[in-house]
Amino acid sequence: MTASSPKKSLPRRKPSSSPDVAQATDGGAPTTEVPDYSRLSGDYHWMYDDVGLKLGTRTPGVRAALRSLPPNAAVLDVACGIGLDARALTNRGLRVSAVDASAEMVALTRSWVSGCDPVPPVLQSTWVGLHEHFAPQTFDAVLCTGNSISHARSSSEMSRWLRSFRSMLKPGGMLVLDVQDWDVIRNLGDRLVVDPHPLERNDSMCRRSWTWTFSPVQKDQCRLDIGFEVTRDHKTTVSTHSVGLRAFDKPELRSSTVSAGFRNPFLDRVPGDEMYTMVAYNPDEPHSPDDPHRIG
Ligand SMILES: C[S@@+](CC[C@H](N)C(=O)[O-])C[C@H]1O[C@@H](n2cnc3c(N)ncnc32)[C@H](O)[C@@H]1O
């Protein structure tokens, strides 16, 4: 969800309606709300240029962290989206499992990884429901890319998700996520960014735009409207997708990560990039039954 100049400032305004959310159930009772990616999923490939489609994540810190994994490491991609990282990592020899709450994203990932050998498992699950699909301490790494953690509507929801991610990690296992640098984005204020370089793919051309709007009431609530103007055979279609995000700061992410039981959270940002990476480790000792951070 990054974009570049030219930038145009917008007047502050109240979002016209709330971004879509859907109730999800985890073993019966509704426990969390998940963003509705059903419409955006069809256009989501336009978020990536052709290199991104092949290689997946573009965040340098995420790529570096993943390179540190041994061959054959078990990786859980908890926000697989359309499956670009799952495919790229499987092709590198890693043992990937992919998860997403969105049925449409899961279907796209399954199709995207269908040519891989082996074909990685792709499951529909929310983050609090991971324990229903996987045994604790199964993975060497948990991957949560594309600013997905900013979907947490509160600090406590973010902590809950982080604890669930940690429960999936082997002792010493690594969490890797990337986050929009909210300090930078908030300072830029409400704005419209139009991509100066349209993408061309399959005889279509797409001009993308991103509109960031911060709530004047709740300073940490941001609405991102992603626009795709697609031209094919001289016909142009415009679609806009709204995503609700929470603009938390780095100390909050660090302290939530530590209180979820991780050690050594390391935050890293390449100058000029709007995204930063966080890498954190599950402690080496196995979870004990009276571990206060234990899930389930
Ligand atoms: C911004 S997309 C990122 C997708 C991909 N990682 C990428 O970088 O392109 C966020 C993804 O997280 C998923 N997601 C958001 N909240 C979730 C939750 N609570 N449980 C499971 N998946 C969730 C969405 O369905 C969506 O596919």
Image: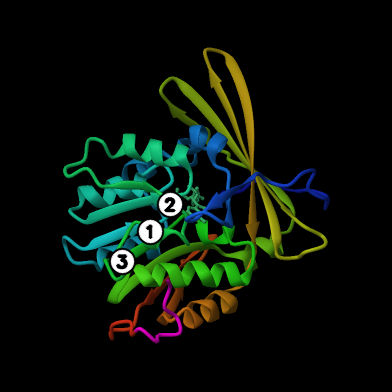
According to the picture, the residue beneath numbered tag 1 turns out to be 132
Which residue does the numbered mark 3 point to in the structure image? 141
Q: Residue at x 32, y 70 (%)?
A: 169
Structural crowding at the residue carrying mark 3, measured as other residues with C-alpha within 10 Å and reported as few (<14), some (14–19) or many (≥20): many
Residue 120 horizontal side relative to residue 23, left or right: left
Can you tell me whether the CB of the residue at mark 2 lies under 8 Å from the nearest atom of ligand 1? yes
Secondary structure of residue under mark 3:
strand
Q: Identify the element where label 2 is drawn.
A: loop
Which residue type carries mark 3? Ala
Residue 158 location (% of width, % of height): 55, 68
List x then y, in percent, for residue 202: 41, 23
Q: Is residue 290 magenta?
A: yes
Instruction: For ligand 1, tell me if the residue under mark 1 lies within 8 Å.
Output: no
| Highlighted magenta segment, given as a residue range | 289-296
Image quadrant assignment for residue 214: bottom right
Q: Which mark is residue 125?
A: 2
Q: Say which of marks 1 and 3 sits in front.
A: 1
Front residue of 8 and 119: 119
